[in-house]
């Protein structure tokens, strides 16, 4: 159920300072997953702007897949 997944990812994405020793990494992974949901319109209305926002947040926190997407977007944007 993508709607349920979205709720869990949103909760995890906002818990950067939680007691878990890997809270920041978990939050970044959740931000990336939210980007995927919004990009693909799974459990939410597709919204490429929100997808990019979540990808950028994840990339800023060193989430590797999101960082790779950011590098690819930058490369494709060059003339």
Image (cartoon, rainbow, N blue to C red):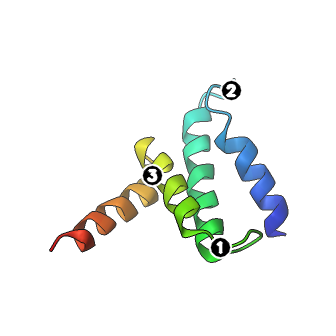
Q: Residue at 78%, 50% (x, y): give it.
A: 8
- Dot 2 or dot 3: first in sequence order is 2
Q: Badge 3: few (under 14), some or many (20 or more) residues near its Cα, within 10 Å?
A: many
- Dot 1 or dot 3: first in sequence order is 1
**Disc marking residue 18:** 2
Q: Residue at 30%, 61% (x, y): give it.
A: 71
- Image coords of residue 24 (percent x, y): 56, 35
- Image coords of residue 30 (percent x, y): 63, 51
Q: On the image, numbered disc 1 is attached to which residue?
A: 46
Element under disc 1: loop
Q: Badge 1: few (under 14), some or many (20 or more) residues near its Cα, within 10 Å?
A: some
Q: On the image, numbered disc 3 is attached to which residue?
A: 56
Closer mark to the observer between disc 2 and disc 3? 3
- Image coords of residue 13 (percent x, y): 65, 43
Query: Which of these two is toward me, 76 or 20?
Result: 76
Element under disc 3: helix
Whether the residues at callouts 2 and 1 have beta carbons within 8 Å, the answer is no
Q: Quadrant of the C terminus?
A: bottom left
Residue 60 vertical placement versus 15 (above, below): below
Closer mark to the observer between disc 1 and disc 3? 1
Whether the residues at callouts 1 and 3 have beta carbons within 8 Å, the answer is no
Give the alpha-carbon distance from disc 2 to disc 1, as whole Å: 29 Å
- Dot 2 or dot 1: first in sequence order is 2
């Amino acid at each position: 159920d993508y709607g349920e997944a979205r709720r869990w990812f949103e909760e995890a994405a906002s818990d950067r300072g939680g007691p878990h020793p890997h809270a920041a990494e978990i939050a970044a992974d959740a931000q990336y997953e939210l980007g995927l949901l919004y990009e693909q319109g799974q459990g939410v209305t597709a919204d490429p702007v929100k997808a990019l926002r979540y990808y950028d947040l994840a990339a800023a926190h060193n989430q590797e897949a999101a960082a790779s997407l950011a590098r690819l977007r930058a490369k494709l944007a060059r003339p």
